[in-house]
Image (cartoon, helix red, strand yellow):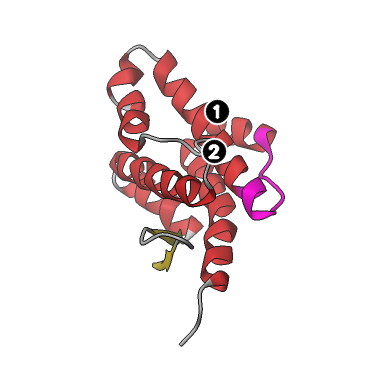
Amino acid sequence: MAQVVRIEGTEATAKIRSVVWVIVLEIVTVFIYGFFWWYFIHRELRDYGRAKGTTELGTSPGTSLLAITLGALIIVPALVSFYNGFKRVQAAQRLTGIEPINGWIGLILFIIFYPAFMGYMQSGLNPVWQAQAGAQPTG
């Protein structure tokens, strides 16, 4: 279901997750999986940002999670967190030398079918983590 890779230059790990499973788990768990997923991708991005020496990928996955849970009661913090999370995925791709995912496609997926938005974000993260796996010594 997910391949664990070590983030180069740290002891932290990231997961290459199946895009289909991200979408299916979000639907099956009635959106509960999304909270866990949101926290974990932000933790991975934070760790990757630390390895690259930048705060552009975020500093507090807990704050990102809080914004989409309790902050959703006010609406604006959740929307800001979704926007910033998407921008962080794009920034991670740029830092890796990968063409960033399209923001317009992300917006359309977010509005029409949120689980597909999550899958799209994960499809952007997977090449970043695959590049990390490729940088690791084998054997």
Residue behind mark 2 = 88
Task: Assign a secondary structure to mark 1.
Answer: helix
Front-most of 47 and 16? 47
Q: Dividing the picture into quarters, in which one does residue 21 lie? A: bottom left
Q: Secondary structure at mark 2?
A: helix
| Residue positioned most to the bottom | 139
Location of residue 63 with respect to 12 vertically, above or below: above
The residue singled out by tag 1 in the image is: 111
12 horizontally vs 133: left or right: left
Tag 1: amino acid: Ile
Contact check, label 1 and label 2, Cβ < 8 Å: no
Query: Which residue of the protein is positioned furthest toward the right in this rendering?
Result: 99
Q: Within the magenta stretch, is there residue 15? A: no
- Which three-letter amino acid code belongs to the residue tagged 2? Arg
Question: Which is more N-terminal, label 2 or label 1?
Answer: 2
- In the image, the segment drawn in magenta is 93-103
Q: Considering only vertical position in the picture, is 41 above or below 63?
A: below
Foreground tag (1 vs 2): 2
Quadrant of the image for the N terminus?
bottom left
Direction top: furthest residue: 74
Circle 1 packing at 10 Å, graded few (<14), some (14-19), many (20+), is few
**Residue drawn 46% across and 46% down?**
50
Residue 83: mark: none
Q: Residue 20 appears at what percent x and percent y? A: 48, 57
Image point 63% across, 49% down: which residue? Answer: 95
